[in-house]
Amino acid sequence: DVVMTQTPVSMSVSLGGQVSISCRSSQSLVHNNGNTYLSWYIQKPSQSPQLLIYKVSNRFSGISDRFSGSGSGTDFTLKISRVEPDDLGVYYCGQGTQYPNTFGAGTKLELK
Amino acid sequence: EVQLVESGGGLVQPGRSLKLSCVASGFTFNNYWMTWIRQAPGKGLEWVASITNTGGSTYYPDSVKGRFTISRDNAKSTLYLQMNSLRSEDTATYYCTRDPRVFAYWGQGTLVTVSS
């Protein structure tokens, strides 16, 4: 199984600040079709997870350009700029390249 | 607007069965693979099962293989998860999601509690 390792486990940020979350996979996430199925999700308190970024760097419909994803192979990063109150929650990376699909343990973003 | 509405959760004793449903709307259901993902209380996300758009193929992790069965009724735009031989570690909120490979839409979830 592909193990997804997220760091940090939690982080504090000031409103208007910038944060980076790292996600590393134990195997390459490049699919046979050439796509890399690495996604980022946010779960706000008492809500279902929501898709932010798919295939490493593509923002989902309606997602602010303050969110950006980058990386390749086994090493990926989510950056959030100009943090707003609505950005607080738990962020998960997830891979859909191979079964079983797996997720990182999450990064909790809190206000400083 | 894509909507996924799960139901069927509740309190069940270990070893018993439960069947979850997910009614989909706002998209052509029979064009999409579907997936169940669960989240134990205070824990992360765990993929549970996926099914192709025709229902011809299904996929499970080892943790539920042989106990859980994913199925669908395309005429009713409904996804199911039959859960047998339930264990305490199956206690979680179960989410229905639209696949493949990227979980773009999630339901509100249904809570399954396995306890005597």
Image: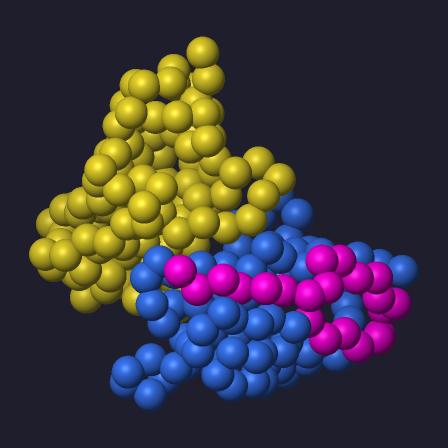
Chain colours: A blue, B yellow
In the rendered image, is residue B115 in sight?
Answer: yes
Q: Is residue A59 left or right of residue B69?
A: right
Residue at horizontal 62%, vertical 57%?
A106
Residue at horizontal 56%, vertical 85%?
A71
Q: Nearer the viewer, residue B8 or A100?
A: A100
Q: Is residue B10 above or below residue B51?
A: above
Q: Is residue A101 left or right of residue A68?
A: left
**Residue B87 pos. (x, y %):** 39, 26
Q: Quadrant of residue B106?
A: bottom left
> Farthest residue toward the top?
B116
Membership of B56 in magenta stretch:
no
**Residue A77 pos. (x, y %):** 63, 78
Residue at horizontal 26%, vertical 28%?
B84
**Residue A88 pos. (x, y %):** 73, 59
Q: Quadrant of residue A7?
A: bottom right
Q: Quadrant of residue B22?
A: top left
Residue at horizontal 22%, vertical 44%?
B70
Q: Is residue A55 left or right of residue B31?
A: right
Q: Nearer the viewer, residue B19 or B75?
A: B19
Q: Is residue B68 above or below residue A5?
A: above
In the rendered image, is residue A86 in sight?
Answer: no
Q: Nearer the viewer, residue A72 or A56?
A: A72
The region drawn magenta spans A1-21
Q: Quadrant of the C terminus of chain A?
A: bottom right
Tag count in the figure? 0
